[in-house]
Image: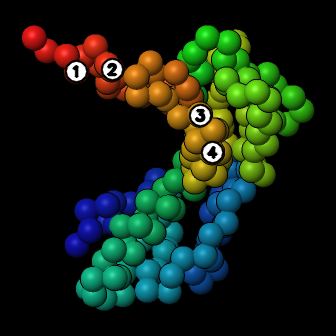
Amino acid sequence: MSRVGRKPIPIPPGVEVRIEGSHVTVQGPNGTLERTFRPEVSIRREDGVLVVERASDERLVRALHGLSRALLANMVTGVASGFQRVLELSGTGYRVQRVGEGVVLQIGYSHPVPVTPLPGVALAVEGTNRIIVSGPDREAVGEVAARIRRIRPPDAYKGKGVRYQGEVLRLKPGKAGAKKR
């Protein structure tokens, strides 16, 4: 039995869950999320918690069991409290400005790079070198953060670029490190 799939999902106060067959709608203070799950996995409400059960013990169904439970738990957490990823710009002259719904990055290219978020995702700027990506959908928040990081990933020699907050980089020694006498 899947250890992840077995755990019940508590429904926090202020969150409403509607189950119609394999289609689940979760509504809360941060918005509404919908998802249709595979028919091999059934979802039911029981005493203020959501329980995910599987139809058989086939390999695919066992994998879907844990996946479905994790996706449903992310939906409940997202509409209740939301998700966020923080990106940091490091490098001389690297900065970010908020423009309308999106942001404009100045990160070493000859031109500014505009970034517009996916629907339901908000971008906030803190100072001149920090971007906060937030929203109720964990998948969309991670996708927008990854797209921003992909514009200028951290350099392996100097560490310049866009990185996630708390991301640890192992810098290469460079030319001088190759010589050993």
Callout 3 amino acid: Arg
Mark 1 or mark 3, earlier in chain: 3
The residue positioned 62% from the left and 69% from the top of the image is 35
The residue positioned 63% from the left and 38% from the top of the image is 151
Camera sees residue 46: no
Of marks 4 and 2, the one in the foreground: 2
Callout 4 amino acid: Arg
Q: Quadrant of the N terminus?
A: bottom left
Of marks 3 and 4, the one in the foreground: 3
Q: 111 or 120: nearer the eye?
A: 111
Of marks 1 and 4, the one in the foreground: 1
Callout 2 amino acid: Gly
- Mark 1 Cα shell of 10 Å, populated few (<14), some (14-19), many (≥20): few
Please give the residue where the numbered disc 3 appears in the rendered image.
152
Q: Quadrant of the C terminus?
A: top left
Please give the residue where the numbered disc 4 appears in the rendered image.
147
- Mark 2 Cα shell of 10 Å, populated few (<14), some (14-19), many (≥20): few
Give coordinates of residue 143: x percent, y percent: 60, 50
Of marks 1 and 3, the one in the foreground: 1
Tell me if label 4 and label 2 are in contact, CB under 8 Å.
no
The residue positioned 47% from the left and 28% from the top of the image is 155
Q: 96 or 62: nearer the eye?
A: 96
How far apart, in angstroms, are the residues tagged by discs 1 and 3? 26 Å
Mark 2 or mark 3, earlier in chain: 3
Give coordinates of residue 28: x percent, y percent: 69, 50
How far apart, in angstroms, are the residues tagged by discs 1 and 2? 7 Å
Q: Given the current orientation, which residue lies at the most extreme left position? A: 181
Callout 1 amino acid: Ala
Please give the residue where the numbered disc 2 appears in the rendered image.
174
